Amino acid sequence: MTDWTPIIIGIVLTIIIGLIGIFIPFLGILAPIIGGFVAAYMAGGDYKDGAVNGGIAGALGGALLGFVLLGAFTAFIGGLALGFIIGLILGIIGGTIGIIVKGRF
């Protein structure tokens, strides 16, 4: 079962880092990875749980971030979908890394 507290923290972290990434180059692309990492690290579990928790945090955070940033310049649905897909992929990567780090330390 999914623990939603770490996921919500990961979503908020993704949005905050993504908004800061407007001013700092390449930080915005790391936002879903860091959010997924934190969500998976806090939730624990195995690789599958880490990928799911990181993917949810990255996808929802990326979708909201894409809606805010890309939706202002293009179609709202396009920004939402692009943010969701990119956030999902990067969140899964971050979640898997979070479980690996938690297992080693």
Image (cartoon, grey):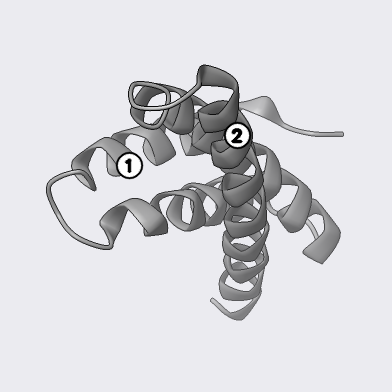
Report the residue marked by disc 1: 18
The three-letter code of the residue at mark 2 reads Ile
Task: Pick out the residue farthest to the bottom.
Answer: 104
What residue is drawn where x is 57% and y is 43%? 58
Given residues 13 and 75, the one toward you in this image is 75
User: Dot 2 surroundings within 10 Å: few (below 14), some, or many (20 or more)?
Assistant: many
From the image, state whether disc 1 or disc 2 is nearer to you: 1
> Image quarter for residue 63?
top right
Given residues 6 and 35, the one toward you in this image is 35
Q: Secondary structure at mark 1?
A: helix
> Image quarter for residue 95?
bottom right
Q: Which mark is residue 48?
A: none
The three-letter code of the residue at mark 1 reads Gly
User: Dot 1 surroundings within 10 Å: few (below 14), some, or many (20 or more)?
Assistant: many
| Residue 26 percent coordinates (x, y) | 27, 63
Q: Secondary structure at mark 2?
A: helix
Quarter of the picture containing the N terminus is: top right
What residue is drawn where x is 42% and y is 27%? 74
Given residues 39 and 11, the one toward you in this image is 11
Q: Is residue 43 left or right of residue 51?
A: left
Q: Is residue 97 left or right of residue 55?
A: left
Q: Is residue 55 above or below residue 62?
A: below
> Image quarter for residue 41?
bottom right
What residue is drawn where x is 57% and y is 46%? 87
Q: Is residue 28 above or below residue 25?
A: above
Q: Is residue 87 above or below residue 72?
A: below
Q: Which mark is residue 7?
A: 2
Whole-angstrom CA distance, mark 1 to mark 2, is: 16 Å
Residue 57 visible to the viewer: no
Residue 23 visible to the viewer: yes
